[in-house]
Amino acid sequence: MKNRIIFSIFIFIIIFSGCSTEIEQDIAPTAPSASYKAGTYTPSAPTITRAGSYGALKVVIQWDNFFDKSVASYNIYRNSTLVGSIDKEDNGPEDGQYYFYVDTALVTGSYDYKVESIGLNGEKASTIINSVGCTNYSPTGNLAGTYFDDWFTGQRFYIGGASIIAYNGSGNVGYCKSDAEGNFSINGLPAGTYSVDFYHPHYFFSTFITVTITDNQTKTTNVEY
């Protein structure tokens, strides 16, 4: 009888040990596949969302490529000449989903642009925007105001670091970022009706308004998220 009990205990230990090993093997983490490691994907080409003349002899370009984790930076070319670079890690989070580049010191005319994604291992993919017009508008008007949020606490919270872009159907585009107190100002907008978009990485939704700009006047509007 004693031997049977010892034998039964021995068999139980063996079975239990085997089950434990099997359970541990089932839940043990595995190393990620090489295809998921950073830098193994070719970056996608940027999606250009806005490109147009901005005030006095400037061009602003907006693109959407924030969620492509294989992108390290962007190069911007004007008529095949490199005119600017943006590092995604440093600049992207400030602008949320969108990136902006303002080309300055231009002359009246038309320009071809290329926005190039640079991968973590140097891979490249690009999008070309042809014939972006640039004009020295005069006279012009301005847009100014404050961007704020009071939904969560009931108290006004000013939203700093928001990217704000104004655009109309004539190819005119204006851009700025709100300061720490939520103040924003876009100058040099030709008269007309503009759609204005407000983006911030810490807010899930964007804010959209429509304003009318009049020459030689500043349109002031306070915008609530």
Image (tube, rainbow, N blue to C red):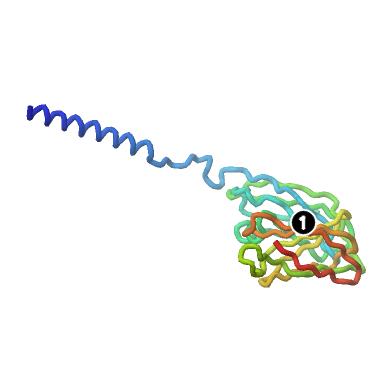
Residue at the spot of label 1: 61
Residue at coordinates 89% horizontally, 68% vertically from top-left?
A: 140
Q: Quadrant of residue 1?
A: top left
* 22 lies above or below 201: above
Residue at coordinates 65% horizontally, 63% vertically from top-left?
A: 151
Residue projecting furthest to the front: 154
Front-most of residues 192 and 138: 192
Residue type highlighted by circle 1: Ile
Residue 181 shown left or right of residue 40 in the figure: right
Residue 179 appears at what percent x and percent y? 69, 70
- One can see residue 225 in this view: yes
Secondary structure at badge 1 equals strand
Residue at coordinates 79% horizontally, 55% vertically from top-left?
A: 78
Q: How many C-alpha atoms fall within 10 Å of the one at disc 1: few (<14), some, or many (≥20)?
A: many
- One can see residue 74 in this view: no
Residue 100 shown left or right of residue 140 in the figure: left
Residue 13 appears at what percent x and percent y? 20, 34
Q: How many marks?
A: 1
Residue at coordinates 54% horizontally, 47% vertically from top-left?
A: 38
Q: Quadrant of residue 146?
A: bottom right
Residue 148 appears at what percent x and percent y? 69, 67
Residue 206 appears at what percent x and percent y? 70, 56
Q: Quadrant of residue 110?
A: bottom right
* 102 lies above or below 119: below
